[in-house]
Amino acid sequence: MTRVVLLGAPPGPISPPPLGGQPALPADITLQSLPGAPSAYDRLLAQAAALDPEPTTIARPGDAAAYQRPYGRVVQSRDVAGDLRALADAVEGAEENLLILPADSLVHDELIYQITKAKRGAIALVVRQQREEVDENAPPAEETEEVPIEEAEPEIGEKVIEGLPQRTRIGRSRIVSVGTAYHAVTRPNAALLGPLHLHQRHLPTLAEVARELADMAHLFGPEDDVTELVVLGLIRRGVSVGRRGRRDLFFRRIRSQAEADEALAEMAGYNEDRARLNNAVKGADGFFTTFFVSTYSRFIARWAARRGLTPNQVTLISIALGLLSAGAFATGTRWGAVAGAVLIYFAFVFDCVDGQVARYARKFGVLGAWLDATFDRFKEYAVFVGLAVGATVSGQFGDGEGVWTLALVAVALQSVKHLLDFSFGAANRRKAPVPLPTLDLTVADDRPLREALEQRRASRNTGVRGLLKLWTKAGKFRLVHWARKMIVFPIGERFAAIAITAAFFNPRVTFLTLIVWGAVAATYTLTGRLLRSLA
């Protein structure tokens, strides 16, 4: 379960009044185009209740009655200091993860799901500064040379993105620094939209910084958001807060009925189901899987999920196809080899589909994970046996002893490779991450934090770590990216190699391909594991 806290007191104005005049409470804004025409608050509360049966709403005393519902809890707070203390009290002793949402949020269910299922221990939703469009017909503007960020001065951001202050500096994958009306930031390039998800291990830190920030509330401006303050505190305590954008999903903070009507019209243009389907596909798959399976397997997954098929049932289909493929290879005939190649391809397709069904339908289980991991190897080794039997039956290789030897070598190589992968993964999970620099909350700008980050970056760019970082950076080139994916010989490439070589050549060529490519993959992987262990 996830603990949910809704922030019922939006920040004060830093931008012009909302479309339609004065701000309105989310409880008074009606979402007229949605079934049942719920209020914005009722819709969000129902979304929150799917995660937490008793979500907490922090609201001003004068607004508390408007937020009161048969379920959920309303905590009254007079100001931002009270909001921070109420948030600290709400997470005190919590054993669940935490999701913070502004009560004026209009958001897709799928976006909430993706935020709460992110692998990072802390993640916030951000919107990046848009690049200014250049009018081709306008006279050329005077060119000004931008100061390098190392020489830039921290600033109290006055720019606005979607009604929120642009006071956040984001990097490639995480938030680097956050500002307030008191805390200056070096070259802010984004705004925090409001949603924040934290793993339970970070909640004691959250409670601590929230109380400390509450004592500093007199330094903040009316536009400073509780989420903004909390993320500031977490980062200055050395917590790595990841960042993500909305991507192909919808989120908007609505402050009036007119804004809500406009946001609903915009939201209707988004395909939430398509985004959910795309999210069901792994983003880090290999070359063969990405371009020859996932382009259409997601639609099979949606079809299966809508007809009630479970991931385990799809896994059984994949196992059956794998065994049929082994049987076809065992005939030792050319048509048997072609049939086996086709069957093993579709066995792999359904091996991808079972996971996609699980992610699309949100049906996860220990049994399913065990079946998927175990029977991938079972199918692969059954096909090895089928190929060796087929080589013996065909008589093309005498008594087939040489092919059986190659089959055993291929099995041994894959077994060792998987053993190394699983053991390194388990050891790597126990390895403590390198701590980020910290900075006292009373320091008015982020220069010391930036300098500490630069020193940390410089120290990590030498020796083995520097070599690994260069290899990681090389991955931004598509050719290198896909070459690195293929060289490790993932299951998609292995099944493709089996299908192609068995259909067009013979089992001997198949096993030699598996052994040679597998040996290269094992050498590359083992080298990388050793270097990362030494870094």
Image: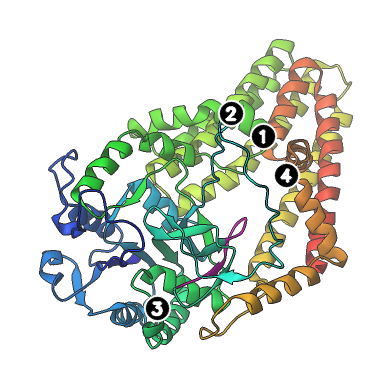
Residue 120 visible to an observer of this rendering:
no
Q: Residue at x 84, y 49 (%)?
A: 524
Residue 173 belongs to magenta span: yes
Disc 4 versus disc 2: distance between alpha carbons?
23 Å
- Which numbered disc, 1 or 3, marks the residue that appears first in the sequence? 3
Camera-side mark, 1 or 4? 4
Question: Do labels 1 and 2 touch, CB within 8 Å?
Answer: yes
Q: Amino acid at mark 4?
A: Lys
Q: Which residue is mark 2?
A: 293
Q: Residue at x 33, y 46 (%)?
A: 108
- Which numbered disc, 2 or 3, marks the residue that appears first in the sequence? 3
Q: Residue at x 52, y 26 (%)?
A: 296
Disc 1 versus disc 2: distance between alpha carbons?
9 Å
Q: Which residue is mark 3?
A: 220
Q: Amino acid at mark 3?
A: Phe
Q: Residues within 10 Å of mark 2 (few under 14, many from 20)?
A: some
- Which numbered disc, 1 or 2, marks the residue that appears first in the sequence? 2
**513 or 60, nearer to the observer:** 60
**121 lies left or right of 27:** right
Q: Which residue is mark 1?
A: 492
Which percent across, then down, holds residue 269? 34, 33
Question: Do labels 2 and 3 touch, CB within 8 Å?
Answer: no
* SS state under label 1: helix
Q: Amino acid at mark 1?
A: Gly
- Which numbered disc, 3 or 4, marks the residue that appears first in the sequence? 3
Residue 232 visible to an observer of this rendering:
yes
Disc 3 versus disc 4: distance between alpha carbons?
40 Å
